[in-house]
Image (spheres, rainbow, N blue to C red):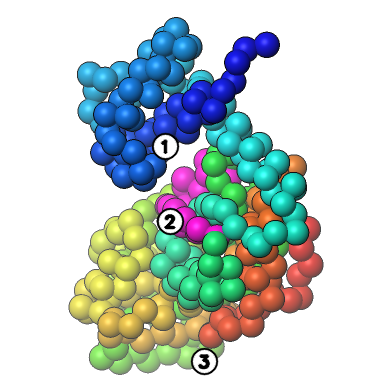
Amino acid sequence: MDDFSGDYISWLRTFYTLVDLKSFSRTAESLGKAQSTITYQLKKLEQRLGTELLNRRSSPLELTSAGEQLYVLCQQIFRLLQQVSDQINGGAEIRGNLRIAANYGIGCYYLPSKIIEFNKAYPHVNIEVRPQPIRQLLKSYYAPEIDLLITLSSILPNDAQQYPLFSSQMCLVTPDDMELKYKNPMQIEDFIKYPFIAFWKEYPLDKLVMEKISECGYKLNIKQYVGFFLPILNYVSLGYGITILDEFQTTSSGFRVRTYPLGDLFPDRAYVVSHQPRQYVSPAAARFIEFLLNDTTIPGLKLRNDVKAL
């Protein structure tokens, strides 16, 4: 049997961290080592494995084919080591790293206050949030380095383990000084003539909006496509047009906008915390799920207590 000494594990940790941070200096700072030590350990690991792991001639750092294989294996190795530690120290204080992927709205508005409160109770859990476009979230769902995914239930695979959090209705968002005359409840013809600020076409919310409006025989007057909801709110605040967003995305301070509920036109959208069905869930991840499910402080949103976790 090969000799898997502590040095070997240390070299793997250095390589794994270097790939994540894409910088020798930041890796050295993160691991509390000299940069020369990082270079030395990477060289020793390559000598041990008999192959190059990084293309040093590229910038930013680029993995070789062997490096890509090793990185995937490192994810599995360190996840397994964490699982061993968690199970052996089951009665100890909860600690460790928790990596969460989420769409931008969740990452910007929903999670910050939750993480602050959670860390008051569990100060030794380090939470990393990776806000991402909706189109990238499914890749994160299958990525072994991600512990939890928080996003729309509708984009997840049917077999995903889902824990319902809240539902958010869709709202028409207009400049604060815009006088909008409309029926009650609001109809599409009440706003269809105004310039519209839209997400990129692959975004699920805009797809839902476009399909509904097209079904009713209308066409949006799209003035600007934008890839992120904060610039969209800024465009609307400046009077450039109107838009449609999830209600919780409109709560940001600093934007002079007015909202009108569209619950009679569009269904509420359900948000969940999820992971793969057979994925190992660390004590930190399990406790964070429990914390979110027990939370009752989501102003303006409907808690999903009517839906049982799968």
Element class at badge 2: strand
Q: Are marks 2 and 1 in contact (CB under 8 Å)?
A: no
Q: For numbered disc 3, what is the local secondary structure? A: loop
Q: Residues within 10 Å of mark 3 (few under 14, many from 20)?
A: few
Q: Quadrant of the C terminus?
A: bottom right
User: Horizontal placement of 203 versus 147: left or right?
Assistant: left
Q: Residue at x 43, y 56 (%)?
A: 131
Q: Which residue is mark 1?
A: 17
Q: Nearer the viewer, mark 2 or mark 1?
A: 1
How far across and how far down the image is residue 108, in percent?
41, 67
Amino acid beneath label 1: Thr
Crowd rating for badge 2 (residues with CA inside 10 Å; few <14, some 14–19, many 20+): some
Q: Are marks 3 and 1 in contact (CB under 8 Å)?
A: no
Q: Nearer the viewer, mark 2 or mark 3?
A: 2
Residue sitting nearer the eye, 247 or 196 = 247
- Mark 2 and mark 3: Cα distance apart in space: 36 Å
Question: Looking at this view, is 38 or 230 the one in front?
Answer: 38
Which residue is under mark 3? 184
| Residue 39 percent coordinates (x, y) | 30, 25
Mark 2 sits on what residue?
131
Look at the image and give the residue range highlighted in magenta.
125-141
Q: 10 Å neighbourhood of mark 1: few (<14), some, or many (≥20)?
A: many
Q: Please state which amino acid type lies under the numbered disc 3.
A: Asn
The Cα atoms of the two marked residues, 3 and 1, are separated by: 56 Å
What's the residue at 59%, 73% (across, down)? 121
Choose mark 3 or mark 1, whichever is in front: 1
Q: Amino acid at mark 2?
A: Pro
Label 1 secondary element: helix
